[in-house]
Image (tube, rainbow, N blue to C red):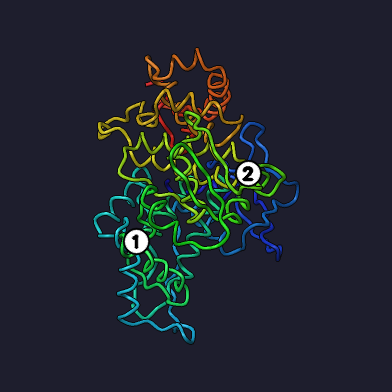
Amino acid sequence: MTPCNNRVFLSKLLKFTIGTDCEEVIIHSDILKSHSTPWFDSDGGSFTGDESIIIEDTDKHIFSLACQYLYTGDYSITIPGDTPPPGLTFGGREKVEQARVLEGCLFRDTETVEQFADYLVRRIQPRPSEGSQGSYSPTMDYTEMLLTHARLHVFAAKYGLEELRDICLFKMLHLLRTFPICQDRTGDIYPTMSAGESVGGLLDLSYEDFTKIQMPLYHGPTVKIKIGAATYDVSKSLICKHSPYFAAMFKGNFKEGEDQSAVLEEVEGVVSNRSIQLLLQWLYLGRVILGKESPAEWISAMIELARLADMLSIDSMESPITEYIRSTILANPTPDNRWFRDPNTNVHHITPGNIDAASHLPKEHSVRMLLVKAAIEAYLRCDDFKFSEELRNVPDFAADILGELKIALKSVTLEQYTPCHFKDPLSGEKLRFLG
């Protein structure tokens, strides 16, 4: 985004009350009109709050960085210049361990970091600065700086500042590549990595290897979950904590509670060995690691996992699954996007089967709505819409499309001598309308 023009400084002043300390920040009202935020109603042309707009879930520092972005199109964090706190010393050993922690992922080399980072800001002009002011030193602790980028990213994601969200990730990627991680902050990482070294690192195991190799290492009261010919021994307290479905089964007056064993029937697109293995990996690690399948197969697996989590009443998985699918779509566009954007970019790896499967999720489920958002560009710009059959045969999908289309049409902008554009509901980017 480009910096604001001088007319902004002639607009009405708005007061924001920030954080639990109720600190006041004054900004110009026109700066909000050029962004999609919950603080300005573009339909009614009004601002939320009579005398002051209250934001309780952040602090003045984070909000000031967001304001810096709103006014300039970028933000910067000054590198700390003071000495590290007592006990937080850095030397050669920490640098070696840092490389060990980050190897095997996207930080494996500078070129890979550049590739991921450049993709995030590929449509942002002028290009954001890569990191922070100053130069890096191996004797400094940059952890708080990284956390500031992360907090700003969370703030931007919550309040719909998609471009700022991507800029935060862009800066974090560059910072994570080079800054020294404080031993006191990463003490829990090294034992975890060591425990899985024999199989290439615990967090690098595929879901199949994880259930075969790592799960037997966990101790405590277990229950058996059987599906087909496979049986999984799972921590009872862990699975009952996350799933009311299993809690009622194993802690209630049912046969499963007496036997401490349950048999799950396979259900196409919901219950399978793959979805159960992904669920167990998430329960034990808080994340899933898919193998070398294609992006289309990743999306199918995640939709299946979302339906299983919904069946088992595990609400905490909805958001990370949605973000995984969204990231997969955005990171794997069509191969012929070099000169002109293919209108099928967002749906390139989405199949008609995915649309049908997602329509079985509850109304307003974020995974279901994500696929609808992804389809809007193709629906508006393609003469031969990829999911025309689904529009006719899957009523819930058709209804969702109409609802999301209404939102997209409200974002259409008309400017003199330039093509008509709308805001892509998936990425937040401005895309050319009808052609």
Question: From the viewer's perspective, is 389 left or right of 314?
Answer: left
Q: In terms of depth relative to the viewer, which is nearer, 252 or 286?
A: 252
Q: Position of residue 214 (x, y in %)?
A: 41, 58
Q: Is residue 42 above or below residue 87?
A: above
**Residue 57 percent across, percent down from the top left:** 65, 57
Sort mark 2 into few (<14), some (14-19) or many (20+) by Cα contacts within 10 Å.
Answer: some
Instruction: Determine whether the residue tagged by mark 1 lies in a helix, strand or loop.
Output: loop
Left or right side of 365 for 74: left
Residue sitting at x 49%, y 65%: 147
| Image x and y of residue 370, in percent | 50, 34
Residue 220 placement: quadrant: bottom right
Q: Nearer the viewer, residue 430 or 372?
A: 372
Kindly identify which residue carries mark 2: 256
The residue under label 2 is which amino acid type?
Glu
Q: Earlier in the sequence, mark 1 or mark 2?
A: 1
In depth, the one of 8 and 150 nearer the eye is: 150
The mark closer to the camera, 1 or 2, is 2
Task: Find disc 1 in the rendering and name its residue.
Answer: 201
Query: Along the line of sight, which residue is nearer the eye, 294 or 51?
Result: 294
Give me the C-alpha separation between circle 1 and circle 2: 35 Å
- Indicate the secondary structure of the residue bearing disc 2: helix
Identify the amino acid type marked 1: Gly
Locate residue 34, reporting x and y percent: 53, 41
Q: Is residue 50 left or right of residue 391?
A: right
- For image coordinates 42% across by 22% down, the residue present is 352
